[in-house]
Each structure stands twice: as C-alpha cells, then as structure tokens.
Image: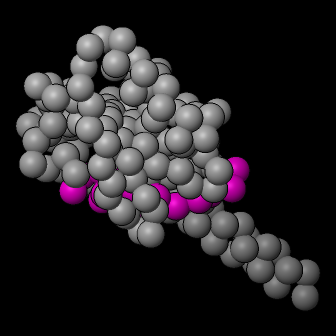
Amino acid sequence: MLEIKYIAGILIIAVLLLIGAGLIINDKDCIKIENTKFKIPDGYNVTDNGKVYNLTNGKDSICIEKKVGNLDINSTIDHYLKIKQKENASAKVSNLTADNILIYKVDIKNSTSCHYWFEDNGKVYSIFTVNKSINTDPLVISLINSKSEFIF
C-alpha cells in the first residue's frame, strides 16, 4: 500500500514537471509585458534593448514598449501629438481594430515612422516603427490578436 502512494506521488511530480516544461518551451515564443503575453509572429526574431522589444523578420520591424502607460489613452495620444506639433510635424490619427480592441494609429507626414496605442484592462500599450511598410498594420493587428493574460 505504501508503494502505491510513492508511485502515485512520483507520477504526480512527473506530470507537473512535464506541464512546467511545456509552459517554459511555449514562453520562448512570446514576449511579456506586465501580465500580458504576446506571441511572436512566425518568421520574426526579437531583441530586447531594455526599454523595448524589437520584432523583425529582416525586412519589416516594429517595437513594443516594455512599460505600459500611466495616462489614459486619450491623454497619451494628446501628449504625443503636442510633441510632434512642437517639432512642426504634421500627424494624422486613424483607427484599426484587433480582437475587439480599438487601436489608435498616428502617421507622421513625410516620415516612415508610425505609432500605435491600444488600451486593454486599463493599461495603455505602445507599439511603433521607424520603417513602416504595407505589412506594418497587419503585423500590429496580429500581435494584438495574439495577446493573452498570465498570472505569475
């Protein structure tokens, strides 16, 4: 009877170790910002410079800031637009959606830079590129659609 308890205990530990290993393996395909994970799109590599994650496939790239904003999304965008106005840069705000989340996109006239913000669970996330292409919007939407919450 005692042997069955030991075997059952060993089996439970083995199953927990396998589950844990699976979580670790799956996490290497994700970036984490606070309590949200974003799946890295297929074909993209990630570098981390401490402040942002840079996702690139060698042709297209975007950066996602590792720190979420403290201001509400409207204040965040207004602040950014005021900075651009001081730089005499003309900016255009438009909207996209991903996973029922409204994304604010700011294009800078005569520039290849573009900035995106979205709010989720009361937190404002920031994504930007300095080299926008026709693939940038779909990439941002894909990244946001891939997000999931985790508790750790």
Query: What's the residue at 90%, 88% (across, down)?
Result: 1
Q: Vertical placement of 101 versus 61: above or below?
A: below
Looking at the picture, tell me which residue is in the foreground, 27 or 150.
150
Query: Does residue 48 appear anywhere in the picture?
Result: yes
Which of 121/94 is in front?
94
Disc count in the image? 0
Residue 113 horizontal side relative to residue 48, left or right? left
Q: Residue at x 10, y 42 (%)?
A: 133
| Residue 100, picture quadrant | bottom left
Query: What is the basis of the colouring in this image?
Result: one colour
Q: Residue furthest top?
A: 87
**Location of residue 92 in the rendering, given as x and y in whole percent from the top left corner:** 26, 38
What is the magenta range? 138-152
Determine if the magenta segment contains residue 150.
Answer: yes
Question: Does residue 118 appear left or right of residue 96 in this picture?
Answer: right
134 vs 127, left or right, is left
Toward the viewer: 81 or 25?
81
Q: Is residue 28 visible?
A: no
Name which residue lies at 33% across and 54% down. 95
Vertical arrangement, residue 10 with respect to residue 146, above or below: below
Kindly identify the residue that appears in the image at 36 percent across and 62 percent down.
Answer: 97
86 sits to left or right of 62: right
Residue 43 image point, x, y percent:
18, 50
Residue 126 placement (x, y as % from top left): 44, 37
Q: Is residue 109 magenta?
A: no
Q: Where residue 18 appears, x then y in whole percent?
A: 56, 65
